[in-house]
Image (cartoon, rainbow, N blue to C red):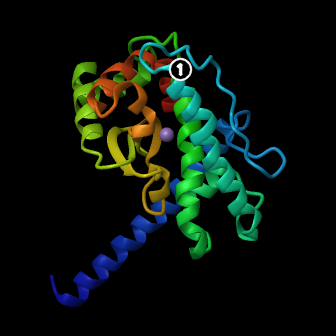
Amino acid sequence: MKNTSRRSFIKNSALTVAGLGILQKAKAEKLFQEHNNTSNFQPADGTFKLPTLDYAYNALEPHIDAMTMEIHHSKHHQAYINKLNELIGKTPELQNKTLDTLVIDIFQAPEAAQTALRNNAGGHWNHSLFWKMLNPNAGSRPANDVFREAMMKKWNDMDSFKAEFHKSAMSVFGSGWTWLVKDGAGQLSIVNTANQDNPLMDSRTIVLKPILGIDVWEHAYYLKYQNRRAEYLDAVWNVIDWSQVSRWYVEM
Ligand code: MN3
């Protein structure tokens, strides 16, 4: 290939990918807003609020202890929300936007606000999903046929999926999250993000929709498991609500 045609090939490819990204992004945004229109993902009166849990702090015992749940929810999650509201209060460009939009459009935010927005809109979004995904009466595996098929296509069985997820979560250095994500073709994969980043924040080019996320910050497990992240990861499967994850797979 000559230099000129190669250059034009690269240029056209980039345009195609960018165009696709915009289409996927628009779709993701719409779907997330529809999906979350009755949840705590949107501000009711301009300020975000701490979502109430569907279960008691001690309901996930012995897998996640009551003290960890109470501090994690009422202190850590609340702190992300407080800082997010504070940031929005002093940044007109961020006002009257849903949480989904703030997260998806993170790179369109004023540059001076981006780091705080990443940490705190991300923190609010990530924990909101996390609480909804946990359930004391969780089933042991995906029941939904479409979702289960996608899982089996990728991993053959649940043990292989859990092994890969576990390995990925153990490799997070410092604080972060491990996610099960769905791409535009419905295919599943496992990704890590640092700090309070969220896979949707990369949606300038490709949309990866998080349908399951495990918090691997030490504050999620230290009181009960101390530094034994592996034990926390083994235990948390007992309280993952697969019917919720299946629903997100189908609807998002
Ligand atoms: Mn946390």
Q: Quick check: can you spot residue 180? A: no
State the residue in front, 69 or 39: 69
Horizontally, residue 40 falls left or right of residue 183, namely: right
Q: Secondary structure at mark 1?
A: helix
**Cβ at disc 1 under 8 Å from ligand 1:** no
Q: What residue do we see at 68% from left, 62% from top?
A: 87
State the residue in front, 155 or 6: 155
Dot 1 alpha-carbon crowd within 10 angstroms: few under 14, some 14 to 19, many 20 or more: some
Q: Please, is residue 212 above or below residue 86 in the view?
A: above
Q: Position of residue 128 (x, y in %)?
A: 59, 37
Q: Please, is residue 20 above or below residue 170 in the view?
A: below
Horizontally, residue 159 falls left or right of residue 240, namely: left
Q: What residue do we see at 81% from left, 44% from top?
A: 44
Quarter the C terminus occupies: top right
Give the amino acid at mark 1: Ala
Horizontally, residue 104 falls left or right of residue 236, namely: right
Q: What residue do we see at 62% from left, 17% from top?
A: 55
State the residue in front, 38 or 11: 38
Q: Position of residue 130 (x, y in %)?
A: 52, 33
Horizontally, residue 22 falls left or right of residue 148, namely: right
Quarter the N terminus occupies: bottom left
**Residue 218 sits in which quadrant?**
top left
Look at mark 1 in the image and give the residue it sits on.
66
Q: Position of residue 24 (x, y in %)?
A: 51, 54
Q: Quick check: can you spot residue 145? A: yes
Q: Please, is residue 7 above or below residue 186 in the view?
A: below
